[in-house]
């Protein structure tokens, strides 16, 4: 069942990821199709949709009009390069206006009072120049004398360049034909005959402001130069267009775009539908790890919903402004391709970010609604909960808040009245108000002092409890009403702690008594068994098997006796029922004696004891109990050390404690913690291949603690380290203690 749920969860997660990828791909697809559509619309003004063929578009008419203007300007207005160079087409008014604009000359009193001569090299002063404008006049005069003639030549060169460009452009078009004649019917210019144009389907004949239009939209044609000339213009466009000029390229682009419109529209519609479906699905499964499971919340769900909505609205405003700005930049920079690409990339990144934020926001709201915590997870609801908690009466009295607010408002009001009385010169009223303020604040100060005193008592009670003084009781009658509820909570904690300690002590005492009683009851029959086994060993048995059985009984009965004795000692040590007689103990000497007692077992295990003791270490302890501690530690080393390894022992004193550290390498891996090793009946050899009760380390710890010492175990890989610390023997204090005992 668990495996099925796990597979379902994995499938749902993969589906979510897949749908999210589809969502972002659809957003990107919609953006790209929109950008293409925008670019097309910008260049063709929706003509690819509104018109049937290229000849009906505004783009074609604009290009055709330009060529007509080129014919008129080249053949009628400019005529040839010699006339341009002679300045025949130079407008004095246009030249001077252009000159002033080029050099940023402000047309005012100076220019109104002056006139440029016919040779363009000096000024004619018509009126008096004001004195405050004399400097400006001199500057303007210098500019005319040094720059105007050069600018006139540059103006003529620009006309000449324009003439050449228009003429070159007419020659570059393969699909445009024209024939121009004067009022007498004489040919002025053209690239085809009148008859050739007449035979073409799409043609136009212009004469003054009237036309014979076969293009479909030249009802009237107005051009001042053309109308004054009295000329007649025949123009036509080839149908179908041949490759080789801008007309053909533009036509190909038109039909390609016309074919692309339905595709772009279809892609955009599919992308929109996909976005909506994927978004609805992600909203539906938001917060679900498996069907019917609990809603799982994300980090974003920790934000209060009302704050989340405000942040999202602000983000919408900023994002909307940035999107409109980037769109306008794309439209107005269409000719600058590099900037257009940059702005398009930024817009795409912004839209992806916006889609991500929108998805996060909607799915978060979905999770909140599904978990029925939409209103509870709002800032308003949190504030209301805080206010209601103040008046719940569990820990803090809510009325104190309003009391403090009232205190502050009262002081403000009295201060305002006092200042008003002082400014008005009413000394008696001012003194009375000052007295009232002092009395009011004195009462408030007394209340605060009492409240702080009560808080001090509560904190003292907490400190005493933390020290282990569970008998300390807090007097609730002496506590201020401000901290009454708080004090009651502390008193309840103290009472509960005392009851828990009493129950724990009672249970520990019962266990110790049970173990002791059972152990004593077992010792009597066990003693009889050991006695009879010893008698059997002294008898001569003819059966070898029987002798082996007797030997096994002897070994196991003595092991059982040792276990019972360990149980009794462990129970006494943990319950504190052992008698402790402290005295002067040489830690090194005691350890060497223990080594001597267990020398045979140490040699059998193949262990080498390395002792490091540079100084005499005399401790203040019970020699009998210390012997048992060292015996248990050495026995533990013999049982669990790697055969034929070294055991290192360090004996020294540190500060006011004598320390012995025993380090050995374990024969098997130690997979339990030091705290677990010191528990009763817990053995480091989990396979239980060695003999032991699992009480040795527990007894050593208990015996160390009842002597005011410390017992620690450290494990680093296979390295086992036992640390015993006992108080150092102090000669003077001991002598005084002995004197007191004699007295």
Image: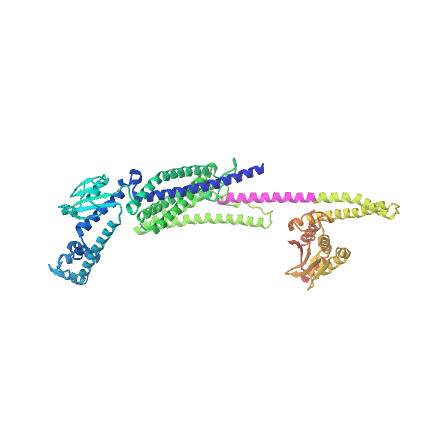
Considering every residue shown, the one lying at the far top of the view is: 292
With 529 as the anchor, is 4 left or right in this view? left
Q: In which quarter of the image is the N terminus?
A: top right
Considering every residue shown, the one lying at the far bottom of the view is: 614
With 197 as the anchor, is 599 left or right in this view? right
Measured as percent of width and height from the top left, residue 329 is found at: 32, 48
With 366 as the anchor, is 61 left or right in this view? left
Measured as percent of width and height from the top left, residue 407 is found at: 41, 46
Image colouring: rainbow
Of 144 and 176, nearer the camera is 176
Asked if 58 appears above or below 670 in the picture, the reply is above
Measured as percent of width and height from the top left, residue 675 is found at: 64, 50
Q: How many labels does the image show?
A: 0
Q: In which quarter of the image is the C terminus?
A: bottom right
> Which residue: 55% across, 39% down?
7
With 53 as the anchor, is 16 left or right in this view? right
Q: Main secondary structure of the magenta part?
A: helix
Q: What stretch is highlighted in magenta?
A: 482-511
Asked if residue 530 can be seen in this view, the reply is yes
Asked if residue 104 can be seen in this view, the reply is no
Asked if 284 appears above or below 452 in the picture, the reply is above
Of 325 and 675, nearer the camera is 325
Q: Is residue 642 magenta?
A: no
Q: Does the magenta stretch include residue 483?
A: yes
Asked if 388 appears above or below 621 in the picture, the reply is above
Quadrant of res 156: bottom left
Measured as percent of width and height from the top left, residue 507 is found at: 66, 43
């Amino acid at each position: 069942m668990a495996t099925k749920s796990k597979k379902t969860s994995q499938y749902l997660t993969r589906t979510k990821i897949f749908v999210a990828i589809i969502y972002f791909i659809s957003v990107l697809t919609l953006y790209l199709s929109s950008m293409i559509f925008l670019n097309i619309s910008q260049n063709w003004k929706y003509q690819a949709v509104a018109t049937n063929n290229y000849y009906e578009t505004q783009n074609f008419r604009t290009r055709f009009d330009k060529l007509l203007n080129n014919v008129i300007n080249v053949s009628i207005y400019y005529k040839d390069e010699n006339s341009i160079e002679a300045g025949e087409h130079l407008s004095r008014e246009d030249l001077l206006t252009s000159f002033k604009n080029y050099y940023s000359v402000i047309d005012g009193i100076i220019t109104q009072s002056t006139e440029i001569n016919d040779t363009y090299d000096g000024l004619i002063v018509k009126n008096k120049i004001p004195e405050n404008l004399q400097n400006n006049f001199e500057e303007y005069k210098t500019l005319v004398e040094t720059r105007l003639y050069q600018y006139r030549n540059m103006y003529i060169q620009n006309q000449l360049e324009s003439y050449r460009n228009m003429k070159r452009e007419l020659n570059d078009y393969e699909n445009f034909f024209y024939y121009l004649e004067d009022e007498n019917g004489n040919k002025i210019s053209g690239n085809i005959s009148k008859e050739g144009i007449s035979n073409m389907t799409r043609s136009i004949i212009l004469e003054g402001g009237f036309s014979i239009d076969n293009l479909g939209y030249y009802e009237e044609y107005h051009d001042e130069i053309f109308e004054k000339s009295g000329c007649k213009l025949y123009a036509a466009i080839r149908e179908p267009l041949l490759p080789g000029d801008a007309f053909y390229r533009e036509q190909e682009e038109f039909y390609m775009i016309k074919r692309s419109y339905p595709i772009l529209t279809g892609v955009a519609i599919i992308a929109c539908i996909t976005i909506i479906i994927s978004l609805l699905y992600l909203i539906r499964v938001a917060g679900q790890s498996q069907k019917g499971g609990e809603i799982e919340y994300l980090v974003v769900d920790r934000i209060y919903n009302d704050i989340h909505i405000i942040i999202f609205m602000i983000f919408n405003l900023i994002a909307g402004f940035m999107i409109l700005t980037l769109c306008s930049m794309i439209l107005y920079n269409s000719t600058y391709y590099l900037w257009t690409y940059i702005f398009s990339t930024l817009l795409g990144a912004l839209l992806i970010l916006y889609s991500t934020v929108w998805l996060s926001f909607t799915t978060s709201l979905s999770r909140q609604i599904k978990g029925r915590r939409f209103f509870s997870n709002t800032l308003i609801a949190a504030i209301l909960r805080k206010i209601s908690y103040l008046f719940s009466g569990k820990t803090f009295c809510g009325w104190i808040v309003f009391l403090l607010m009232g205190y502050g408002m009262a002081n403000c009001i009295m201060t305002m009245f006092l200042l008003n009385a002082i400014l008005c010169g009413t000394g008696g009223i001012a003194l009375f108000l000052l007295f009232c303020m002092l009395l009011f604040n004195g009462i408030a100060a007394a209340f605060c002092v009492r409240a702080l005193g009560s808080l001090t008592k509560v904190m003292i009670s907490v400190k005493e409890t933390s020290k282990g003084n569970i008998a300390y009781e807090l007097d609730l009658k002496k506590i201020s009403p401000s901290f009454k509820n708080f004090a009651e909570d502390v008193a309840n904690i103290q009472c509960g702690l005392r009851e828990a300690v009493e129950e724990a002590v009672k249970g520990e005492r019962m266990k110790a008594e049970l173990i002791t009683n059972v152990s004593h009851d077992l010792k009597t029959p066990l003693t009889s068994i050991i006695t009879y086994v010893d008698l059997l060993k002294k008898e001569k048995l003819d059966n070898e098997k029987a002798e082996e059985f007797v030997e096994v009984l002897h070994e196991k009965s003595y092991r059982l006796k040792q276990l019972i004795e360990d149980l009794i000692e462990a129970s006494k040590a943990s319950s504190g029922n052992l008698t402790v007689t402290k005295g002067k103990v040489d830690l090194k000497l005691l350890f060497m004696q223990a080594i001597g007692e267990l020398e045979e077992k140490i040699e059998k295990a193949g262990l080498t004891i390395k002792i490091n003791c540079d100084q005499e270490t005399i401790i203040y302890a019970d020699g009998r109990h210390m012997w048992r501690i060292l015996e248990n530690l050495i026995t533990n080393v013999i049982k669990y050390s790697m055969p034929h390894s070294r055991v290192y022992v360090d004996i020294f004193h540190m500060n006011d404690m004598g320390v012995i550290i025993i380090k050995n390498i374990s024969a098997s891996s130690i997979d339990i913690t030091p705290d677990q090793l010191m528990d009763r009946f817990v053995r480091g050899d989990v396979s239980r291949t060695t003999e032991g009760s699992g009480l040795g380390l527990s007894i050593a710890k208990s015996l160390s603690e009842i002597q005011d010492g410390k017992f620690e175990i450290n494990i680093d890989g296979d390295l086992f380290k036992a640390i015993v610390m006992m108080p150092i023997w102090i000669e003077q204090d001991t002598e005084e203690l002995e004197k007191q005992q004699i007295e």
